[in-house]
Image (tube, rainbow, N blue to C red):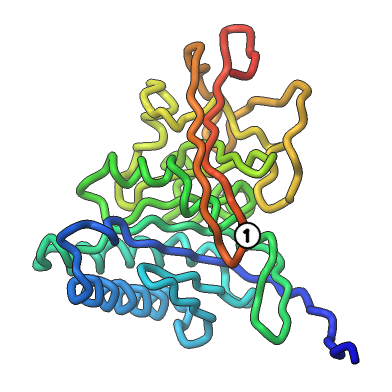
Amino acid sequence: MAENRSEPRSEHRALLAVDMAGSSAPDRNDRAMARARDALFGALESAFDRSAVPWRECEVEDQGDGCVVRVPARFPKAALVHPLLGTLSDLLHEHNEFASASTRVRVRAVLHAGELAVDGRGMTGRTQVVVARLLDCAALRAALADAPSAAVALAVSERFYEDVVEQGGLGIRPDDFWFAEVGGAGSLAVAWLTVVGERGRGARRRRDGSGRDAGVGAGRDAGVGAGRDVGTGPRSRTGIGAGPVERRPTGGFTFNGATTFHGDAVGGDKHVWTDEQGRNR
């Protein structure tokens, strides 16, 4: 007899995912990992509560060396950028000042928002797959590695950038973000990156072309979270939120990787820039 199951319902959530850097470092044994994890979760809880987004009202999925926090739609998404991430960065800096090398905490973080399918087993959907792809992308890993004094490197989806970051507001500076493209599974997604607490890094990367993740523009048709495949025809290349972006020299590279998240395969990065004629490379 077929089991009677109700159809999943759709609910909107903002998602903050964090992942600790260096979880597999040789000097980070189980005891050190537990201490670092305790510091991370303590800082997250305090940062949420201080930002008027109560931790106890969010759904937290423990990932061992990080977590995914699902925030109910009634809370403003802008608060997740400011003051929450700045507060998290400050709290982690306070911890790291007196922590041993093996228990210091530096994290990659991702913000995205969208619909999730809710059933008796929990939540799932494309929104979570996008978050996983951005959290594991090489561009975000490089952003944190290139800022050794920072505690938090952040990637936001194109949708979150347009809906929240690009609108500005108290403590939110679109010019602090720079652009990267994240590819995998036959599609191309857009991420906007920043290092929390390091103002001007995004603007400098766009201005001098030194950032290997800086693109020619947002490529709005890439559609993070919209589930659209990238076509083969010409694509618009205009900057979002920070004015025109200088063209990169001819050339490029592709990072190919793979990971899984809730059983879904997600891919690595593809960074694209253009030549002098505006052709994709």
Label 1 amino acid? Asp
Q: How many marks?
A: 1
Residue positioned 47% across, 46% down in the render: 137
The picture quadrant where one finds residue 102 is bottom left
Q: Is residue 15 left or right of residue 126?
A: left
Question: Please, which residue is most extreme toward the right here?
Answer: 1
Image quadrant where one finds the C terminus = top right
Q: What percent of the width, then of the height, locates residue 250?
A: 51, 11
Q: What percent of the width, then of the height, locates residue 259?
A: 51, 53
Residue closer to the observer: 149 or 246: 149
Q: In this view, does 7 lie to the left or right of 32?
A: right
Q: Can you identify the residue that label 1 sits on?
A: 264
- From this view, report whether residue 214 is shown above or below residue 49: above
Image quadrant where one finds the N terminus = bottom right
Q: What percent of the width, then of the height, locates residue 152?
A: 33, 56
The picture quadrant where one finds residue 203 is top left
Q: What percent of the width, then of the height, locates residue 215?
A: 52, 28
